Image (cartoon, grey):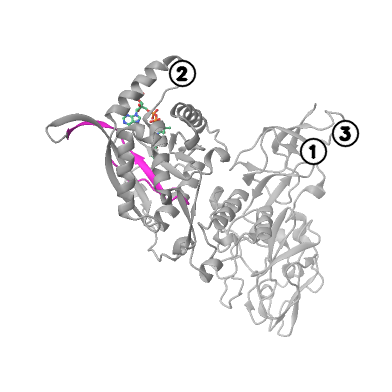
Amino acid sequence: MALVEVKVPDIGDISEVAVIELLVKPGDTVKAEQSLITVESDKASMEIPSSTAGVVKELKVKLGDKVSEGSVVLVVEAEGSGESDAPAPAAAPAAQAPSPAPAAQAEAPAPAGAPASAASGPVEVHVPDIGDFKDVAVIEVLVKPGDTVKVEQSLITVESDKASMEIPSSTAGVVKEVKVKLGDKVNIGDLLLILEGAAASASSAAPSPSAQTPAPAAAAQTPASASAAQAPAPSPGAGEGRGEGQSAKGEASAAPHDPTKPPIGLPYASPSVRKFARELGVPLEEVKGSGIKGRITQEDIQGFTKAVMAGSTRTKAQGAAAPAAGGVTGGGELGLIPWPKVDFAKFGPIERKEMSRIKKISGANLLRNAVMIPAVTNHDDADITDLEAFRVSTNKENEKSGVKVTMLAFLIKACVSALKKFPEFNSSLDGDALIYKNFWHIGFAADTPNGLMVPVVKNADQKGVLQISQEMGDLAKKARDGKLSPADMSGATFTISSLGGIGGRYFTPIINAPEVAILGVCRSTTEPVWDGKQFQPRLMLPLSLTWDHRVIDGAAAARFNAYLGQILSDFRRVLL
Ligand code: CAO
């Protein structure tokens, strides 16, 4: 098997572009031309394809790295075992290389019908030279008849399977007729629209023929604010964003997008992710990106879709049509004042560190759950004196088995019993209905170096305390090693968050939607408890039950806690 280095091919006039997505990992089998990474300049994003089929042995780049033509992306064990038929990476065919704005294009001749330098009559606006792109699909039409457009204002967004870009106007004027529609395939020179009262601002600044020529690369090196003699460039971002004011409605007041600035308006996403979102009908602008600079990844689209399907998120269109599950509309409608922006460096030295991916994802979920669930917490205490004695003796007896029983395993079993007695605690909201689940999968919060994770003990009702302890130990280890699979973390019907091993008295855990309740447990302490005649030293376990007030009321929560306390004080009740 020959190891082949796959390098960044000729990507036109672009160097030092940031890696914003890794699309493969070691062990993956890749085909020739399969996209390996997505890179992004301030003009466009594009996927870098593999020149070779094989198995990925090593990734040579990481998120945020800057790459240029010739940079090694990864090492592939080439199919065909290193024989000479394995294409050498350096020979990556240019055709595979997305090159949205090759430098050579800067001097490209004006496309047929390039705008007149100054005109008041109708002027045709054509697709400028867009490099290697042929038959690219129109994915957005950003103006309509009657709109006033400025020079360099984006008119349409086009997309190939490797990159997307906005096509700017070479001329200012009022749109008389748009000659393309969504889904059309366009090429250099194709007629885009007809402008009236057009007067190319280029004319006043530089009457040279090249100045009137839409030349992507030339302008790509020049801020939009520079002289209009610079021909307009296909602007950034590959359709990732529109300049402020450059709305799809094409308001007359629209300011041309400044390509030196990150696009505002539409979100960042690679062409394949945008395509994926379109296929699923996901409104990209409503998806929160978890990638670099808030870039939307395929996982974000999948997560958004799952959340919409589960009823925990609504698209704006859905929000306008009907109330969300449980009658709450989107969090974006809270009308809150903006988050305070403080320059902390003014007050002392600071250090900025990116949060872990897990923290970002769990943070977004926690925020939604905290904001959208009318949650209340009931605190109570359970007498676990006898249970603790039983646990200690069980552990002594089982010393050799290697399985250590902790209080949490008993709590899981006790909670199953309480959930069976109070089934609404084991339910989920579905619009105006409740889904009662006839299975008891208990999630438990596990503290890991990367953040909080919630593995799930499935079918806890069918398992003994020893088996639950064993499974919990395995799952907690997997969590700490970062090896939990999505299946390990899904399906919970109720969650327990135990801080008993750490300390504290009571806390208010946040419900793990779409569940409707969560039990928080803190450290047990020996306390004097009045038995009617005298104070007895009893081991008391603090319980904090948070519940969704749309589903559960305070009386039910108090009963749940009381029942749980009874079981924990005399575990034989589990058998009843
Ligand atoms: N009272 C007193 N002692 C307790 C206790 C309690 N309620 N619960 C556990 N302990 C003791 C255990 O008996 C053990 O003592 P020994 O080492 O002397 O035997 C010690 O605390 C450590 O227990 P543990 O934490 O390893 O085991 P666990 O089964 O209680 O918990 C796990 C496992 C994975 C849940 C835990 O390690 C963890 O990650 N807890 C943090 C959960 C968390 O972060 N919740 C907050 C979520 S909101 O941000």
How dense is the environment of label 3, judged by Cα within 10 Å: few (below 14), some, or many (20 and up)?
few
Q: Which residue is mark 1?
A: 52
Q: Nearer the viewer, residue 465 or 369?
A: 465
Ranked by sequence position, the earlier of labels 3 and 1 is: 1
- Image quarter of the C terminus: top left
Q: Which residue is mark 2?
A: 402
Q: How far apart, in angstroms, are the residues tagged by discs 3 and 1?
A: 10 Å
Picture coordinates of residue 153, whole percent (x, y): 64, 70
Would you say the beta carbon of the disc 1 residue lies within 8 angstroms of ligand 1? no
The kind of residue on which mark 1 rests is Thr
Q: Nearer the viewer, residue 371 or 28?
A: 371
The kind of residue on which mark 2 rests is Gly
Q: Nearer the viewer, residue 280 or 19?
A: 280
**Secondary structure beneath label 2:** loop
Segment colored magenta: 505-529
Q: How far apart, in angstroms, are the residues tagged by discs 2 and 1?
A: 49 Å
Q: Which mark is residue 85?
A: 3
Q: Residue furthest front?
A: 576
Q: Is residue 288 above or below residue 386?
A: below
Would you say the beta carbon of the disc 2 residue lies within 8 angstroms of ligand 1? no
Picture coordinates of residue 326, whole percent (x, y): 45, 61
The kind of residue on which mark 3 rests is Asp
**Secondary structure beneath label 1:** loop
